[in-house]
Amino acid sequence: MELNLDVFTAFPELESRRLFLRELQDSDADAIQAMRSSKAVNRFIARNDTITSEEAQNLTEKSRQAFENRTGIAWAGVRKGTDAFIGACGFNRIDFQNLRAEIGGEMSSDFWGRKLAIEAVAAIVAFGFQELGLHSVEARLDPANRSAIALLESLGFVKEAHFREYVYFRDAFRDLVVYTCHRSESQAP
């Protein structure tokens, strides 16, 4: 078995009921900077609370390079009809040998509570299984991030590991959990 490399011919655009998922663009940099400079968004992510405009621009370029190098796929989520950037989500790492990918993402707090994240993640997981040919998708996150865990569990992800004091950030150790969904268990449409 092997992954379908044809998906890397042209960037795969996805849709859900309310969202359009497209490639990150340079014009997204300001929205990315605002989102990644939010203490609320960064609450469960071990990274600095602010980024510069240049760093945000570098993220868009890094995501394009990851797609070109077939190491990852990052989508920008935008509201249909408004083109409002709501966040980014995708496969941060693709393990070709084991037909596995790590999913990760973030959403501007302006759009929380509308169940938009589940639409985006469901579309990306379905793409991973149906088009890319993945066997499994994993997510690594802070165990205190109950909203993200509930989202993952609703799509068929199960907790596979809990690493105690795994991440060292801001002079403290934090736990890390791994949730995984296998193609046969997925609840993504």
Image (spheres, rainbow, N blue to C red):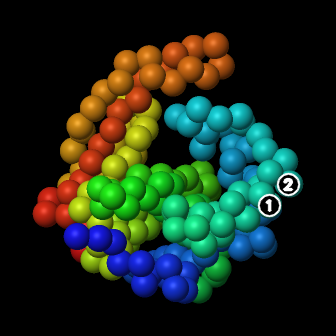
Where, quadrant-wise, is the C terminus in this rendering?
bottom left
- Quarter assignment of residue 1: bottom left
Q: Which residue is under mark 2?
A: 53
Q: Are marks 1 and 2 in contact (CB under 8 Å)?
A: yes
Q: Which residue is under mark 1?
A: 57
Q: Amino acid at mark 2?
A: Ser
Judge whether residue 179 can be spotted in this image: yes
Q: Secondary structure at mark 1?
A: helix
Whether residue 130 is situated above or below residue 105 in the rendered picture = below
C-alpha span from label 1 to label 2: 6 Å
Q: In this rendering, would 170 be left or right of 141?
A: right
Whether residue 57 is situated above or below residue 22 in the rendered picture = above
Q: Position of residue 178 (x, y in %)?
A: 33, 38
Q: Amino acid at mark 1?
A: Gln
Whether residue 92 is situated above or below residue 168 in the rendered picture = below
Q: Position of residue 105 (x, y in %)?
A: 51, 54
Q: Residue at x 24, y 38 (%)?
A: 159
Judge whether residue 111 can be spotted in this image: no
Q: Residue at x 77, y 40 (%)?
A: 50
Q: Secondary structure at mark 2?
A: helix
Q: In this rendering, would 62 be left or right of 93?
A: right
Q: Nearer the viewer, residue 90 or 109?
A: 90
- Quarter assignment of residue 128: bottom left
Q: Position of residue 142 (x, y in %)?
A: 44, 32
Q: Nearer the viewer, residue 147 or 61?
A: 61
